Amino acid sequence: MKTLDHVTLGESESITIPCLYDNQYKSNSKYWCKGFFWRSCQITAHSKTTGRWTITDYPAHNIFTVELNKLTSSDSGYYWCAVEIGTHANPDNKKYLYVTVKSAPDVSVVNSSVSGHEGGDISVQCFYSSGYQYKVKQWCRIIDQSCYKMGRTDTSQNSSVQISDDDGGRSFTVLMTGLRLTDSGWYFCSVGDLQVPVQLFVQKDNKHKNTSESDDAGLFPSICRNQTASNDTEDSNCSPEDSPDQMDWLFLLLYTAVPLLLLLMLVLVIRRLIQKHSQF
């Protein structure tokens, strides 16, 4: 089980906590438990029930999320992401974290969900209080626990992560360039021992779509291009699917009519010869 260690947020705010589990637990029930000691913690959310907080399971990605709403300072404490196994030999799989709820959180983000396109860029701004000005700032990915510190780090041939700190503004900015589809997932801003989760969506790049459509349009007469682009099928004479069929019918007509015409001419010639021979 993988999740964050110490999450912070403001009162009356909402937050979504990601909990990553092993592939073998796709079909198991998931739950969220509160308490310092595991044996005495109280289940506050379950994947099979609905309540104040909500658990959503994503078996295809081996992750479930816990949505916490309208938190108050009394909700601060230790919590557990857990997968229900229920055997003595193989107890439930679990991972604890601490949640701090304050009127003014020491670490926060503008958007907890960001999206970009393949090959493009995204930026995330992470804010921190004055007491955390000299703490280590990081941008980390939960699935492999990899973290990037101040400066620039090349993550592959075409992508990189750059972190710049603005001391005066009490924030640092994460810039991810050359995004790949595999960059999608859960990350977190980290300042000292505090963390705030951020979900990144990378969408497939469709920049070649227009080029492909332009090339296809060049194969058809200009009068038909607008109809092809708009999927207008009312005029069958401009349908690219019908063009080959029309050509086939034309060739079939030619191949059938020419031999019949020759045969008719031959019959007429033979008939005239027979008539002349009978006169003699």
Image (cartoon, rainbow, N blue to C red):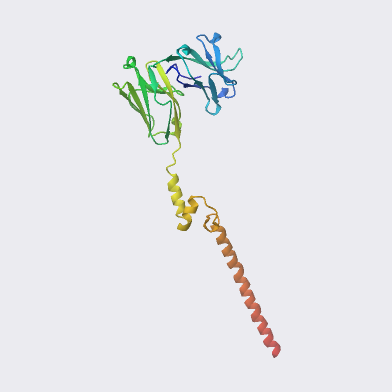
Dividing the picture into quarters, in which one does residue 244 lie? bottom right
Where residue 76 sits in the image (x, y, percent)? 46, 12
Above or below, 123 against 268 in this view is above
Q: Residue at x 55, y 18 (%)?
A: 45
Q: Residue at x 64, y 74 (%)?
A: 263
For this rendering, which residue is in front, 103 or 128? 103
Above or below, 262 against 210 in this view is below
Where residue 247 sits in the image (x, y, percent)? 55, 61
Where residue 239 sits in the image (x, y, percent)? 53, 55
- The single residue placed furthest to the right in the displayed view is 278
Q: Is residue 35 left or right of residue 85?
A: left
- The single residue placed furthest to the bottom in the displayed view is 280
For this rendering, which residue is in front, 268 or 56? 56
Q: Is residue 171 left or right of residue 257?
A: left
> Can residue 221 be seen?
no
Dividing the picture into quarters, in which one does residue 145 lie? top left
For this rendering, which residue is in front, 25 or 241? 241
Where residue 193 sits in the image (x, y, percent)? 39, 15
Question: The C terminus lies in which quarter of the figure?
Answer: bottom right
> Can residue 40 be seen?
yes
